[in-house]
Amino acid sequence: MIATFLRSTLLKLAVLENLSMRLRVFKTFLDGHFGPGKVVRLTRKDGVLFRLDGHTEITPAQLSSGELRRAANDGPCVRDSISR
């Protein structure tokens, strides 16, 4: 019975590991895509946030107009989080 539980748990964790890897790739893309000094932070509560100067955080709606255009053209995930 314990072996079955462990196998089930490991399968669930494997799914989360795949999701984690995909989110890391997405974050790396966003970090390189937006202006220097902007680092993406993904949170469960707020979704996508951008950290400026290591401290200040802004939402996607607070990006510059050029960055918003870039997000609208290239990143449906960012665009979706702007409309929330």
Image: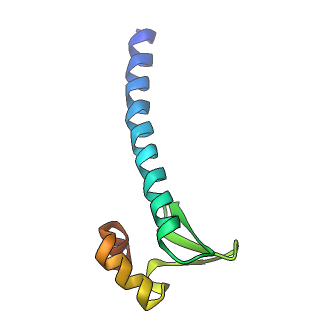
Q: Position of residue 7 (x, y in %)?
A: 40, 17
Q: Position of residue 37 (x, y in %)?
A: 63, 75
Residue 46 visible to the viewer: no
Measuring 49% from the left and 86% from the top, which residue is drawn there? 62
Quarter of the rendering occupied by the N terminus: top left
Q: Is 6 located above or below residue 58 in the figure?
A: above
Measuring 44% from the left and 32% from the top, which residue is drawn there? 13
The residue lying toward the viewer, choosing from 55 and 24, is 24
The residue lying toward the viewer, choosing from 5 and 12, is 12
Determine the image quadrant of residue 78.
bottom left
Quarter of the rendering occupied by the C terminus: bottom left
Measuring 38% from the left and 26% from the top, which residue is drawn there? 11
Q: Position of residue 79 (x, y in %)?
A: 33, 75
Q: How is the image coloured?
A: rainbow
Describe residue 59's horizontal placement relative to residue 37 as left or right: left
Measuring 45% from the left and 37% from the top, which residue is drawn there? 17
Number of disc labels: 0
The residue lying toward the viewer, choosing from 83 and 31, is 31
Q: Position of residue 60 (x, y in %)?
A: 45, 78
Residue 63 visible to the viewer: yes
